[in-house]
Image (tube, rainbow, N blue to C red):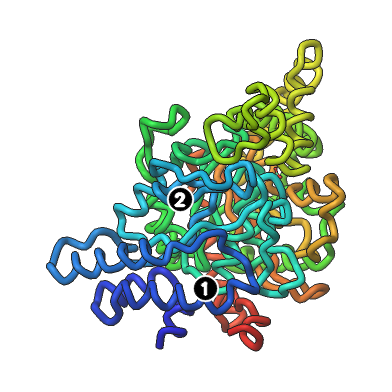
Amino acid sequence: MTAELTRLGASALAEAIASGQSSAEEVTRAHLDRIEAVDEAVHAFLHVSTESALDQARAVDRARALGDAPVSRLAGVPLALKDIVVQAGVPATAGSKILEGWIPPYDATVTRRLVEAGVVILGKTNLDEFAMGSSTENSAYGPTRNPWDLSRIPGGSGGGSAAALAAFEAPLAIGTDTGGSIRQPAAVTGTVGTKPTYGGVSRYGVIALASSLDQVGPCARTVLDTALLHEVIAGHDPLDSTSIPQPVPLVVDAVRRGQADGVAGMRIGVVSQLRGKGYQAGVLESFDAAVATLAAAGADIVEVDCPHFEYALAAYYLILPSECSSNLARFDAMRYGLRVGDDGTASAEEVMSRTRGAGFGAEVKRRIILGTYALSAGYYDAYYGSAQKVRTLIKQDFEKAFTAADVLVSPASPVTAFAIGEKVNDPLAMYLNDLATIPGSLAGIPAMSVPSGIASDTGLPVGLQIMGPALGEERIYRVAAAFESAYVAAHHRSVPDAAPELEVGVR
Ligand code: GLN
């Protein structure tokens, strides 16, 4: 029975808890047992909060027994939290040695909203150091493994959250997406993940990477579960100055609409620049089949041209290092975590330099140096300034595209999960994994990845990216739900077929 509970999605678990068929404690224990059984192999978690998770679950059960009004639609459902979002009293590392031992004294707004909704936080998930990477190999605590094939990467930077979903260790997860860190891991693990419109979810209490790009978002195994989580975490927050003063998008209704009415009459744009060079054959084959599925479901397929996307990666890898070089200056050996070489004679500057030398990994150092250089006097206009101009051109490409189409689609990742070790020493090869996700990040628009089947050349999951105009969350969820329903109907199976290796091996 308990093993079966971990196979259920968030909405089914919430129903089982609400009807009294299962208790929140039982559901939480089942997931903690599953973590115990498989996480040594998967390494999705950096920290498991066994006691506080069980306490939270019991509180939900008590409230239900007392007949208190149901806290929320997800009360009692467990969740995996990316270890870049802080939770009071629980260690936060952001995947870095420099934060080792730091225990945040406060909750991020997202954490607070989850707790208030009765969502049970199982623990903190692994990520590339400070969310820089596309494979989770840049974590200072060792890589996470893809449950579909343990010799492969689960994507990044939020590989821990995505792997936890695919390995049935949690039915819900939180990610952050600056250049694709929710969507690309979702794609390569056969799960669902959404990057909301910039400012749609509070960044308060989220360790900053690049503040003009960072977005928190919901992850799950189905579109409906993702939508339910989206509504819990979204909404205006006065503690985040870039938070949008808008009501929470009604994405759950949009999902129901997509399931009932499909996409008939909607214009779906295929971005020519996001389906050519650099994309694996099996990914393109799956993508074309997905477009055919949407056409068969009644959508009008149009081809759209976004000529400046070609420069997106270059612009992003100037803007992101610039912003992160400034954000990461706060890790100065005085305020948080690690302190190296404080022998009583060393100056503050020496301690800072030793701590940063020992505490940051190679990719983080690379980006701090690049960013500091790009922002330095005399170079600002040539690098950061030009990159910002490219960013505007990309936004304009999107604006034009959204006059011809209601949503845009592309593969979410140009390739399926690659082998651990394959690209880790080649930063450029690693950056190319973000080819499809970065334009949407630069424009601040909402975008999600939904499973679109298995690539015939590698036998691994492929994700379909669906992008909408700013605040167009309801549209992308509608299309995602319609696609998911059509996909399930065509394949007579649930999405995703997760983790074959774990079925026979660890499970
Ligand atoms: N892979 C991208 C990078 O390394 C995206 C990171 C992210 O979205 N956090 O910057």
What element does badge 1 sit on?
Answer: helix
Q: As displayed, is residue 210 above or below residue 79? A: above
Left or right of 448 on screen, residue 228: left
Left or right of 451 on screen, residue 260: left
Which label sits on residue 315? none
Q: As displayed, is residue 274 above or below residue 370? A: below
Residue 384 in which image quadrant: top right
**Residue at far top of view:** 378
Question: Which residue is located at x 76 percent, y 42 percent?
Answer: 363
Question: Which one is closest to the eye, mark 2 or mark 1?
Answer: 1
Q: Percent from the top left, x then y, of residue 273?
A: 78, 46
| Ligand 1 position by quadrant | top right
Amino acid type of the residue tagged 1 in the rendering = Ile
Q: Which residue is mark 2?
A: 474
Q: Percent from the top left, x then y, of residue 423?
A: 84, 55
**CB atoms at circles 2 and 1 under 8 Å apart?**
no
Front position in the image: 505 or 362? 362
Question: Which residue is located at x 60 percent, y 36 percent?
Answer: 213
Q: Which residue is mark 1?
A: 35
Q: Quadrant of the C terminus?
A: bottom right
Question: Which residue is located at x 65 percent, y 35 percent?
Answer: 442
